[in-house]
Image (spheres, rainbow, N blue to C red):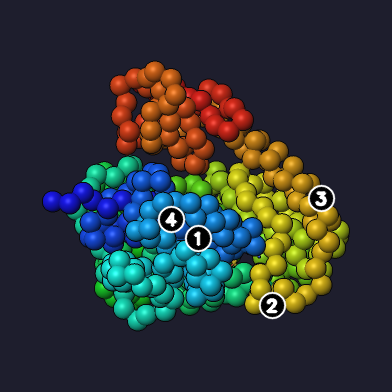
Amino acid sequence: MSAPKKLFIKTYGCQMNVYDSERMAEALGGQGYVETKSAEDADMILLNTCHIREKAAEKVYSELGRFKGLKAEKPDLKIGVAGCVAQAEGEEIMRRQPLVDLVVGPQSYHRLPEMEAKTREGEKALDTDFPEEDKFEKLKSRPKAKRGPTAFLTVQEGCDKFCAFCVVPYTRGAEVSRPADRILREANDLVERGVREITLLGQNVNAYHGAGPAGDMTLAQLIWELDKIDGLERIRFTTSHPNDMQDDLIEAHGTCAKLMPYLHLPVQAGSDKILKRMNRSHTAESYLRLIERIRAARADILISGDFIVGFPEETEEDFQATLDLIEEVKYGTAYSFKYSTRPGTPAAERPQVPAAEADERLQRLQALLTRQQREVQDSMVGRELGVLFEKPGRFEGQMVGKSDYLHAVHVQAPTSQVGDLARVRIVSSGPNSLAGELIG
Ligand code: SAH
Ligand code: SF4
Ligand code: F3S
């Protein structure tokens, strides 16, 4: 038998890309590939890319340039670009960087095996279609390999919201929900393989409306079906849009014990003028009222957010409105970005904010968010929380896991194993994590 070919995948961008990289590795597994952690060893290198901001997209080309030497040494090495840059730029990638053999968009991953075979014949392979067939079914995983305790599971993909700054509706396509029975099958399979926590993924995950036994299901209904799976201890979902936060989902946060008290609910900005220009179709006020309703269902829920500063025509006053909103919500975690002009999006045509101004605002915003995050994290000290152990810590007998609120927690737990869900008393809060001790 010939030695297995080696595949090196580097993943950029969001969690959906992480999930997709796993599926691509499985698809190429059928072609005799095993994964390697070193590009130097690889027979195929795949970059799973992100197009969300200019920097993310440009990184791909500098990374590709670094493989020149490798390809010269190893003419059989195949280099592929997948993900959202592949979708957005297509053939242009091969023109700009001729060492690329394969370009595959996010909706065509199930065609990878044929595409790989084509490159082995010395041809270039390009596929950025939005095909009709269900790629998830075609990507069904192979042998039942044991898995770590946490997993992502894509339930919805694409977006119809067209926020004025965002490339996702173009790179991921229209919003599509997977049928519930296939998701439940995949979830059961993950649990059999050792998974205890599943994070449901979608660009607009709370717009989920996949087919169920009695018509379309909401995300909350899907969560209640997952709740029935023995051995599955925790359910999370991301990312949600404020306008799709339905009543039954809010309610589930108060009543479904497996649904973790954590909600990523991006608002982007606090000024109604800017929100309107962003085409967000919610106001600062409607967002704040929504947060109130969510907290009425689950008082201790940790709220996470995304923010863009320096959106076209953002004034100091608009920016102040974002700071005010943050003060009112109190975020437990947050991701904040300087607006990045994306060709082809409506906001790219609007008067831009000078970079120095946007930089300065981003610093002020991040200072506030960092302070809030630290306060929320510090408030965990003295509490008893569930911690799902994900790996051994740096010290003898130590485990590291995530709390219900997704904070990293270090615990002295010599007899515990990866995958254990322990009760832990939080004793201290450090710069990036909590420390706790086992109860009982
Ligand atoms: N579907 C999610 C997130 C999409 S992308 C949502 O609706 O919120 C993740 C985050 O990247 C966005 O929430 C936004 O804050 C940021 N982002 C998207 N486009 C951007 C751009 N052009 N410049 C800067 N940040 C951007
Ligand atoms: Fe992008 Fe807006 Fe869709 Fe989120 S809701 S993916 S920010 S267009
Ligand atoms: Fe990036 Fe595409 Fe995800 S643009 S954030 S990898 S959906």
The amino acid type, in three-letter code, at marker 2 is: Pro
Quick check: marks 4 and 3 in contact, CB under 8 Å? Answer: no
Answer left or right for 330 relative to 204: right
**Does label 1 or label 2 sit earlier along the sequence?**
1
Mark 1 vs mark 3, foreground winner is 1
**Does label 4 or label 3 sit earlier along the sequence?**
4
Q: Which residue is mark 2?
A: 346
Q: Which residue is mark 4?
A: 71
Q: Is residue 279 visible?
A: no
**Does label 3 or label 2 sit earlier along the sequence?**
2
Q: Residue at x 41, y 68 (%)?
A: 102
Residue 215: image quadrant is: bottom left
At which x and y percent is residue 277?
73, 73
The circle on residue 360 is 3
The amino acid type, in three-letter code, at marker 1 is: Thr
The circle on residue 49 is 1
The amino acid type, in three-letter code, at marker 4 is: Lys
Q: Tell me the distance, in whole angstroms, between the alpha carbons under discs 4 and 1.
A: 20 Å
Q: Tag 2, which secondary structure? A: helix
**Does label 4 or label 2 sit earlier along the sequence?**
4
